[in-house]
Amino acid sequence: MSRMENSVDTSLNTLEILIEQLKSMWEGLVQLMPSLVIAILFLIVTWIIARFASKIADRITAKTNMRPSLQELIDTLVRISIWTVGLLVSLTILLPGLTPGSLVAGLGIGTVAIGFAFQDIFENFLAGILIMLREKMRIGDYIKCDDIEGRVEKILLRETHVRKLSNELNIVPNSILFKNPVEILTDKDQRRHDVVVGVSYDTDLENAQAVIRKAVEETEVVDTNRTIDVFACEFNSSSVDYKVRWWSGSGQREMHDSRDQVVRNIKRALDDAGIEIPFPYITHTFKEKIPLASND
């Protein structure tokens, strides 16, 4: 009987302790309620200020020549800054024992821990900011980076979308584009193209050079205001090879079109002049072997 009484007493004591703890928690919540209401109101004010500041930033950046991705970055940084200050102040209101100094110190320690845990994410985020800040590599540029090749569609904070000419999409982490050399083929409106043409050994080389140069000059898409080069460059197995260089549009479709017209004109001009192109040593050396997309 005494054991049962002890068990009942223990249960009652446990229940009383639980009730006291719940009452204490309720009283603490009631005491915290004014601070909680003020903190929530301050967060609402922070939200209003963040929206207002974002609109102001959009209006200011819209008057500049910034790329859209950089305008979006500035808008994001403005909102993040305002929300960071708003959250710190709200926590200080809600928990009076916390001071701004202790919050900043705790935030610093937490940032280091989070930085180690999400190193790759932050690396891509920072690389995205730096890519947006530099002037090169615009939307629409055709780029090469390691095995990545295509047209830039979007530049986001953590990744860049590169569309291949065969229409596949590459989603590239920004850290790759920032840490590795990137070749921007369309950085300028024009770039230099070249082909190699061979003529037989019994050909008058000066005459062949003049014929080839005239053929290139008469090609519609070639910029005749810039230098056209026709260099005898190599003794091949059954031909003397000329390297022909000219300037034309930098786009991929323009590159294919100009080479097509130049090769056709050179072949026609050499045939008309009775100059032999030895078979099978007709060579067309291209710097880029890129598939031709019908929609480019």
Image: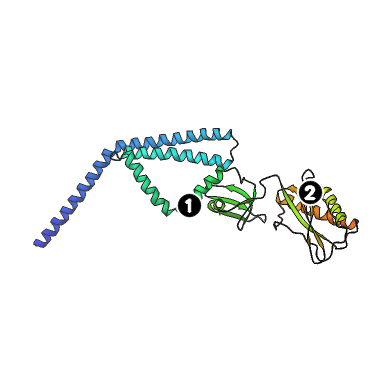
Q: Element type at marker 2?
A: loop
Between 281 and 248, the one nearer to me in the picture: 281
Is residue 296 in view? no
Residue displayed at 74% across by 59% down: 285
Where 89 falls versus 194 (above or below)? above
Where 180 falls versus 94 (above or below)? below
The percent coordinates of residue 23 (x first, y second) are 22, 45
Residue displayed at 45% across by 41% down: 80
Mark 1, other Cα within 10 Å: few <14 / some 14–19 / many ≥20: some
Give the number of the disc on residue 42: none
The percent coordinates of residue 137 (x first, y second) are 61, 46
Q: Residue furthest left?
A: 2
Name the residue that disc number 2 marks: 228
Closer to the N terminus: mark 2 or mark 1?
1
Q: CA distance from mark 2 to mark 1?
A: 48 Å
Between 6 and 274, the one nearer to me in the picture: 274
Q: In this image, 281 relative to 177: left or right? A: right
Between 21 and 175, the one nearer to me in the picture: 175
Between 7 and 138, the one nearer to me in the picture: 138
The percent coordinates of residue 114 (x first, y second) are 40, 51
| Three-letter amino acid code of the residue under disc 1 | Ile
Residue displayed at 49% across by 41% down: 76
Q: In this image, 110 relative to 183: left or right? A: left
The reply to whether callout 2 and callout 1 are in contact (CB within 8 Å) is no
| Three-letter amino acid code of the residue under disc 2 | Ile
Name the residue that disc number 1 marks: 121
User: What is the quadrant of residue 87 in the picture?
Assistant: top left
